[in-house]
């Protein structure tokens, strides 16, 4: 039976603040943000066993040790960078701690933790570029069969929740995860999965800013009410619904269903990454290009029409003076952040339009921007308006610069570790 995983996300600076204030309870259960797309490097399964004078001091010391162990594991996995860093440096690059399991005693802390490292800062230390090689954008349509009924986005399902919880930072596959609102229920339904026609599929993937589609499938089989559950998983790809791999997992009771599905998502992602490395997960050219037609000799009228069209295109190119499309990723903690960020981007000189194409409330959304000029000009315009801009070329990542706060002096009596 799969171990039960507690979904708790703890931000370390906030936790340290609580520890300094002498709080008894340092964190409360909270689910990860919906559609998490922060791109953090995640290291799981970090075991710690620490003793101290008090329970709070033991937990604080356990988190410190987990940060050090997690960084060493990440450095080995990425194949570069220093194996150890100072605690102050680790505090600046750790974006959160996931509590997988913990036991707290009067003066002992035993836990299994996951560490989330900021992708840009950790990548700079490890010598890994922010835009490391990933697949082309792939639209995710999770399909669940339960009780003989297949559902994708028609209704909210446990399988959709599992893909919402999944953090994509460690994956080489660039997943485009719809929010499940608006036209999603009509466009991305169980019936669409079995339609191989390229015309409708092309319209759908373009709507979501993707180049192809992946279809992770689960069939949930309940042995009896409240009893064991077996999940049969399939990793499928493309409009032809091609099977890349399959497996089965089981839990002992209904309470373990979220754990079962979370494990299934990770296994399916591993299949997709393997297929990407072997060249099998390659975007279908027919999804982006119109099908060829039989060649026929053009008439004089057709040649004249083509010449007129080419002249019109050349004139339009001169008018826009090098306009292009740029993809911008930005944080959307709430609905108001979408309108505010779009308005801020439109205010940059040279921006013709800015529209959100992939919405993930509580995570990272994607905006398509039509800009007249070199992308470096857009970067400079955003930076002068207080944005921190990452990435290069036609793909940028922006976020507001954090305010500078002067920390108060700490006296020797405020040692949270009890020393």
Image (cartoon, rainbow, N blue to C red):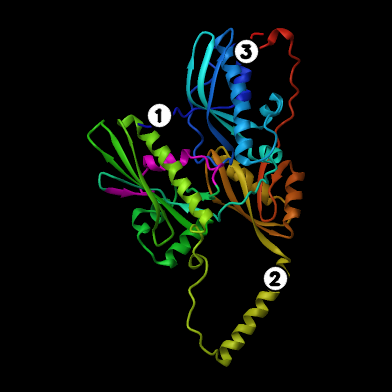
Q: Nearer the viewer, residue 231 or 17?
A: 231
The kind of secondary structure element at disc 3 is: loop
Q: Which residue is mark 2?
A: 317
Q: Nearer the viewer, residue 131 or 21?
A: 131
Q: Nearer the viewer, residue 397 or 351?
A: 397
Number of numbered labels in the structure image? 3
* Magenta stretch contains residue 125: no
The answer to the question of whether label 2 and label 3 lie on touching residues, with beta carbons closer than 8 A, is no
The kind of secondary structure element at disc 2 is: helix
Instruction: Using the image, tell me which numbered label, if any, was put on residue 319.
Output: none
Which residue lies at the image location 70% right of the left edge and 7% below the top edge?
A: 413
Q: Is residue 160 left or right of residue 276?
A: left
C-alpha separation, residue under disc 2 versus residue under disc 3: 62 Å
Instruction: Using the image, tell me which numbered label, if any, was put on residue 21.
Output: 3
Residue 45 image offset from top left, x and y in percent: 51, 30
N-terminal of the pair, mark 1 or mark 2, is 1
Start and end of the magenta stretch?
Answer: 149-171
The kind of secondary structure element at disc 1 is: loop
């Amino acid at each position: 039976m799969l171990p039960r995983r507690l979904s708790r996300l703890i931000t370390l600076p906030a936790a340290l603040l609580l520890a300094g204030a002498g709080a008894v309870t340092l964190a409360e259960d909270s689910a990860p943000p919906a559609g998490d797309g922060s791109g953090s490097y995640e290291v799981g399964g970090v075991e710690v066993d620490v003793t101290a004078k008090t329970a709070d001091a033991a937990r604080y010391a356990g988190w410190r040790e987990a940060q050090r162990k997690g960084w060493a594991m990440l450095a080995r996995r990425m194949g570069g960078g220093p194996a150890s860093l100072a605690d102050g440096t680790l505090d600046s690059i750790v974006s959160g701690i996931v509590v997988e399991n913990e036991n707290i005693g009067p003066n002992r802390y035993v836990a299994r933790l996951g560490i989330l490292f900021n992708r840009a800062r950790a990548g700079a230390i490890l010598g890994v570029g922010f835009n490391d090689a990933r697949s082309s954008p792939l639209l995710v349509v999770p399909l669940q069969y339960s009780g003989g009924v297949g559902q994708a986005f028609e209704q909210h399902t446990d399988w959709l929740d599992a893909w919402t919880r999944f953090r994509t930072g460690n994956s080489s596959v660039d997943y485009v995860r719809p929010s499940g609102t608006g036209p999603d229920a009509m466009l991305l339904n169980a019936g669409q999965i079995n339609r191989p026609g390229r015309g409708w599929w092309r319209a759908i993937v373009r709507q979501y800013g993707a180049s192809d589609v992946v279809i992770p499938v689960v069939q949930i089989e309940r042995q009896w009410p409240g009893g064991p559950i077996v999940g049969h998983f399939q990793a499928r790809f493309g409009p032809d619904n091609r099977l890349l791999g399959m497996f089965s997992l089981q839990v002992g009771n209904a309470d373990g269903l979220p754990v079962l599905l979370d494990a299934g998502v990770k296994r399916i992602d591993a299949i997709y990454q393997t297929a990407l490395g072997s060249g099998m997960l390659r975007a279908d050219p027919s999804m982006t290009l119109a099908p060829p037609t039989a060649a026929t000799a053009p008439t004089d009228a057709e040649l004249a029409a083509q010449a007129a069209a080419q002249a019109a295109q050349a004139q339009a190119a001169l008018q826009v003076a090098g306009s292009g499309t740029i993809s911008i990723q930005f944080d959307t903690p709430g609905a108001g952040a979408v309108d505010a960020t779009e308005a801020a981007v439109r205010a940059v000189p040279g921006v013709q339009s800015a529209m959100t194409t992939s919405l993930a409330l509580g995570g990272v959304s994607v905006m398509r921007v039509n800009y007249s000029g070199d992308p470096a000009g857009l970067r400079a315009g955003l930076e002068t308006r207080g944005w921190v801009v990452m990435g290069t070329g036609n793909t940028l990542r922006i976020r507001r610069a954090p305010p500078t706060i002067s920390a108060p002096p700490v006296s020797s009596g405020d040692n949270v570790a009890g020393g």
